[in-house]
Image (cartoon, rainbow, N blue to C red):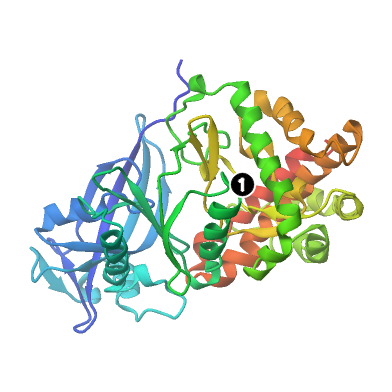
Amino acid sequence: MSDAPKPVCSTVVAVIADPECGRVLTEAGRLPELQVTGSVYFGQDVTEAFGKQLGAELELLRRVAFRRLPASETHQLREAVWSLDLLSDSASGEWLLPADLPAEQRPWAEAALLPAPPARPLWQRSGGQARLLAWLDDELSAQERPRTAALQVIKHTQISFLARVPTASGPLYFKAVPGFFRSEVPVTCWLSRELPGAAPPVLAADDAQGVVLLENGGETLKLNVVGWGFPDDQRGAWTPDDSRALLRQVAQLQRASEVRLSELRGLGLREKGPQYVLAWLPRLLDGRYFRTGQPDGLSTEEAQRLQAMQPELEAQLERLAASPVALTLGHGDLHEGNVLKWQERFTLIDWSDACITHPFLDANPGYLVPGEHAEAAADAYLEAWKDVLPPAELRALYRAGQQAGELFRALGYIDGILLGVEDASEWGNAHLWHFRELLKRAGEV
């Protein structure tokens, strides 16, 4: 019997609002709806599909709602509600007030009609993508590499806009980030210039607008290591040597950054090493972030087990802080989805969580390579520090870093994304993944 995941089928609802008149576009008294094969979580092909259905030119604004439905015998089922901007003069359908909609659809229409709050990024505002596209096309024209077709949206979320840019000489990539991630642009530029392999080549950037134009950095790994949305398992083309090479390259980049930390601090990177996590530890474990009793929250038993680990975690973090392994550049969200393969080497992408940290908190093979390769990959990684500590001590310290690193990753949400986004509910449970991973690792150190 095959263990391949069921294909995804999505119900997509469009909210096309007319804020001046307080109304929304409908078909047969309901918001326009369609069924598509595949996920539309990041907005893939939504405007094209509704554009054909409604005979209109549309643009993505933001995802208003998303939920996983009970699976059928043949498919995983999803429901996504997207707010869209109407760019053409007309569209088929009838304009109605939210009060005239079915009760379950009224909140979506009302949300789409509200004024945009300050936290909403430019690409989720009416006319915002046109401003970004104008910058992009100016830069492409200056480099004599004009677009040959419309942008192909890869991700459209509160924390980033990423699109493939078709050109005659091959695809380029355009990314925009919100204000609280604005340091990603200068950091990516610095890394692409100073540490080859740390980021794709940068063709153009604007720190103030938070936008960057990148060369193709390679192909996604699609190993499905932690089940984060890569349905096409390609492990057949991935070898233990690939796993060792990836972790070896990560270590080389970290060590190369040791003597460049003053430059990285000048780019706005925060220090988030063991002392930073230690300072947060009492708050992380006092229960306020466990969401016990709420959907998908930690159970009482999980919460108690996690709290019982506090002395062990304190000891691990203090051990890391006192170790002779120096702080380095940290990616902050280092997993297979943020690694591209370029010929025999790799390119790291998405430096929005970049910081200065202990390297062993940041680089965990469990997020990067198949489990059966993890031990060999860890050995290859630790070779870079063989001048610092004996192998047995390095290995023990690394295990402590992997375990405490789950708290480091959880803080990327708690002390990062959740403070900056308009709708924190989208990310409200994300840190719980790392609490649960920490429980799985209990007793490994």
Q: In this view, does 131 lie above or below 59?
A: below
Q: Is residue 92 above or below residue 300?
A: below
Q: Is residue 123 left or right of residue 158?
A: left
Q: Residue at x 70, y 41 (%)?
A: 251
Q: In this view, does 370 lie above or below 167?
A: above
- Residue lying furthest bottom in this view? 20
Q: In this view, does 89 lie to the left or right of 445?
A: left
Whole-percent x and y of residue 189?
Answer: 52, 59
Q: Judge by depth and name the residue closer to the eye, 352 or 326.
A: 326
Residue where numbered disc 1 is placed: 334
- Residue lying furthest top in this view? 1
Q: Judge by depth and name the residue closer to the eye, 335 or 309.
A: 335
**Quadrant placement of the C terminus:** top right
Quadrant of the image occupied by residue 318: bottom right
Q: In this view, does 185 lie to the left or right of 18?
A: right
Residue type beneath disc 1:
Leu
Q: Residue at x 78, y 65 (%)?
A: 280
